[in-house]
Image (cartoon, helix red, strand yellow):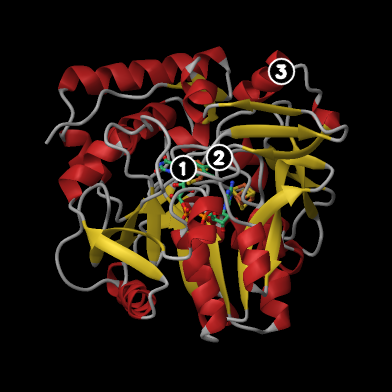
Amino acid sequence: MSNRFSSVEEIVKFGFCMGCGLCAAPSLTQGKIEMSVDDLRRPRPKLHQPLSEHEERSIISICPGINVIADAKDRSGAAPDPVWGHVARLNLGYATDPAIRFRAATGGVMTALSMHLLRTGRVAKVLQVRPYPDQPLVAVPHVSTSPKEVLDASGSRYGPASPLTVVSQLLDEGEPFAAALKPCDIAGLRNLQRTEPRARDLIRFTMAMFCGTTPDLEPTLAFLDRSNVREEELVSYSWRGNGCPGPVRAETLDGRVAETTYNDLWLSAPFKAQFRCRICPDAVGELADIATGDCWPGGEPMGEDAGMNAIVAHTALGETVLAEAEAEAVLATHEYNLADLNAAQPHHVRLKQEVKDRLEAKYGAGSPRANFQGMRLDILSDQLSDEARAQVRAATIKRIESGATSETFEMPEVIKD
Ligand SMILES: Cc1cc2nc3c(=O)[nH]c(=O)nc-3n(C[C@H](O)[C@H](O)[C@H](O)COP(=O)(O)OP(=O)(O)OC[C@H]3O[C@@H](n4cnc5c(N)ncnc54)[C@H](O)[C@@H]3O)c2cc1C
Ligand code: SF4
Ligand code: SF4
């Protein structure tokens, strides 16, 4: 076997697919691929017809499952932080419009910036996701053209989503757009920009949330089960939002409402994540112009708060748009620092430290090699003790031998500086 990936099937088989949907974008593979779901309801590409050699090669070169490339040329200034990449600016902040701040996942930064980009004419559209009306646990791509649509697509969907299936349609339509998505989705857009001039021209701004994983649906389905709600009865479901973090809330067609807390959903039992999330070289969105996440010290909420984002501008463009949004009072910001960010995101620090050894275990077991460049995985791995690294490798090998396609996700202890 070659040590590089040679087909879409191999990307899926070896656990490098996270279901972004880019390979199913119609003009890339002429409709030969559509997204389907596997036995754990994770979106995966399904081939209807064999791809041509050219189509296969082009997908292999842009699939963000196996290609994540930090491009030093786009960056300026100081050396990148090992975990967070190039940090042009780091702040705490929130949407000054209380309706946005309250409704959104955290403080509404992605929503407020998306609206700002539309209002100022920098873009005509924003690519986001929204719940599928008949199956609210599933998210579908949504192209917002108005502030109302942007607000309707706010919040965090911790369920299946393949937002990049609509990218070729957006390029064909020829209007400038922004994307407010997960880091791996943004990596797919960056890969496309490397090979496709229209993507370079039309994708004008990218935002990503910090993304610990797209978890399997088990904890969500267990909550519905405990609440005597059948999935087919759902008319709406939110994992958070309407507060920070806000309730986990399920609503049924006949008007019943079931609620639990965010911590109860995720911390009552360890949850599982697809393998690609456990080897994610950029789960913090360093390829995006702006990345944003929570800032709860220790990594979990201690109760409800008003909603405050950590905001990392990674590019000069990100810095400019952030300054514009501050000047127009779209966002209010405060100072923040990397030590506090690490303490608020201990799982991201630990994940990134472990990626190299997980990958090495995977390659040792026969997997083709991914093209992850410029992600500082060696430096991060060296921060772990030999014993910790050996444990990571052993656990990964055990998982590969068991044949499981998901892995239990455990929150690490809080990182102290
Ligand atoms: C899968 C997932 C994992 C997360 N992991 C972390 C984490 O490790 N650490 C952390 O601090 N925060 C995590 N979050 C929460 C996230 O950080 C907050 O959503 C972030 O602070 C953005 O807040 P906001 O108020 O600016 O978002 P909003 O203004 O509500 O905007 C959110 C944007 O994200 C889009 N979106 C929502 N769900 C998805 C999805 N599944 N796929 C693609 N786009 C989506 C929405 O359409 C919208 O454009 C996660 C969220 C998700 C969906
Ligand atoms: S492009 Fe996206 S959906 Fe297709 S194989 Fe790669 S990760 Fe999976
Ligand atoms: S952890 Fe990485 S691969 Fe998994 S959903 Fe988040 S950004 Fe994508």
Q: Secondary structure at mark 1?
A: loop
Q: Which residue does the image show at 28% across and 31% down from the upper left? A: 298
Q: Is mark 2 within 8 Å of ligand 1?
A: yes
Q: Which mark is residue 31?
A: none
Q: Are marks 1 and 2 in contact (CB under 8 Å)?
A: yes
- Give percent across and percent down for residue 96: 42, 65
- Give percent across and percent down for residue 6: 59, 48
Direction front: furthest residue: 98
Vertical position of residue 123 compared to residue 160: above or below: below
Q: Which mark is residue 227?
A: 3
Three-letter code for the amino acid on which mark 2 is drawn: Arg
16 on left or right of 397: right
Q: Which residue is mark 2?
A: 240
Quadrant in the picture for the C terminus: top left
Q: Quadrant of residue 345?
A: top left
From this viewpoint, is residue 22 visible? Answer: no
Observer-nearest residue: 18 or 32?
Answer: 18
Q: Which residue is mark 1?
A: 244
Which badge, 2 or 3, comes first in the chain's sequence?
A: 3
Separation of residues labelled 2 and 3 (CA atoms)? 17 Å
